Image (cartoon, rainbow, N blue to C red):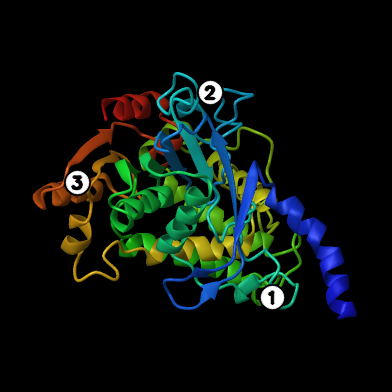
Amino acid sequence: MVAQLEYVKRVEPLMKDMAKTHGSTFTFDHLPLQQGGSLSPVTIAYETWGTLNDTGDNVILITHALTGDSHAHDPAHPGNCKMAWWNPLIGPGRVFDTDRYFVICSNVIGSCYGSTGPTSPDPRTGRPYGMRFPVITIRDMVRAQHRLIEHLGVRHLAMVAGGSIGGQQALEWGVLYPDLMDKVVVIAATAALTAQAIAFNEVGRQAIMADPNWYCGDYWPGSGPSTGLAIARMLAMITYQSEEVMEQRFARKPVQQAMAPSPANTPELGGRFDVENYLYHQGNRLVERFDANSYLYLSRAMDLYDVSEGYPSLEFALRRLQSKLLLIGIRSDFLFPAAHVRWLAEKVRSLGGDATYIELDSPHGHDAFLKDWDQLTIALQQF
């Protein structure tokens, strides 16, 4: 018991520092999990903007991407995407108009930004869960979010919207709770990940687990597998870009800015290309703000997602959709190719659903949903 208390005393401040929780939290007792077992208790970190009306139905739920958090909007810095990840889209008079709507964004379970995840203390031991945290899915995330909106007094959603793994969540909302929302916006996501995308994610996970500082997930917060996590992020950043924009930005230019340390602190082999330095920088930035075990769990949830799981067929699952559906593809997206997003829209229409497809003509690849604000605004306004 003494050792356990000492562990908590030393680790808890580090865990709180890593969480960087914005806004508020809501804790409930028990969440049954899709893969079996349950999570108990469950805390959800969330933020809200605007005012909930008397009928509880002027609500927009925003769902975030893999390493995102609940801080989608920062009223103190309106429009500044460096301060909040969807800031240019949220606020008074913007697409997600906080003068009209009550906008909610919650941090998913499994993350390290205030919601219950691998960095959270296991109530049985007081130590962080680490790899003892249960396998979670997109459906589990959505069910936890459903508990949150019930707690907030929401009776109906005007819209659910998100990109990438957030787009998977938005689609799952439409299928799992078909009569609860008017519109669903799925950006740069499909009904299931391709084998190629799963393969890239697995290479990233193996980089983390091969790091000697991973210790099977039982590392001290703040001193974990930084090399493996940085390499995983480097690989992921390649899939978020496109060849087109990489050539435009970097080509074969030598390093242009301050030299970022390589994840493995390896010697230079004949100089450094600018694109290499960019990847090192991105890897180092993620290590500073994200937990490696959370990366393992959330990337796996992305892989495991199949909207048809638990239903007789994909068609059966998609026929459950009752809301208007907007699917936004990105011309240069390597991770979720636009053709796959378009196919899903056509599939929903063939089954009698109300689905619209819009394609962003952007060179920014998968990351366009976090960069191409003008095109995104136009697409969302049309919907």
Q: Is residue 48 depicted above or below 191 in this figure?
A: above
Q: Quadrant of the N terminus?
A: bottom right
| Mark 2 and mark 1: Cα distance apart in space | 41 Å
Q: Is residue 263 depicted above or below 55 in this figure?
A: below
Q: Is residue 179 left or right of residue 140?
A: left
Between residues 125 and 55, which one lies in front from this camera angle?
A: 55
Q: Earlier in the sequence, mark 2 or mark 3?
A: 2
Between residues 251 and 117, which one lies in front from this camera angle?
A: 117
Kind of residue indicated by mark 3: Ala
Q: Is residue 349 visible?
A: yes
Kind of residue indicated by mark 2: Gly
Instruction: For label 3, count other residues whose C-alpha is less than 10 Å away and answer few (under 14), some (14-19) or many (20+).
Output: many
Between residues 266 and 237, which one lies in front from this camera angle?
A: 237
Instruction: For label 2, count other residues whose C-alpha is less than 10 Å away and answer few (under 14), some (14-19) or many (20+).
Output: many
Name the front one of labels 1 and 3: 3
Reading the image, the residue beneath label 1 is 215
Q: Is residue 101 depicted above or below 262 in this figure?
A: above
Q: Position of residue 145 (x, y in %)?
A: 48, 53
Reading the image, the residue beneath label 2 is 79
Kind of residue indicated by mark 1: Tyr
Q: Quadrant of residue 354?
A: top left
The residue positioned farthest toward the front in the image shown: 54
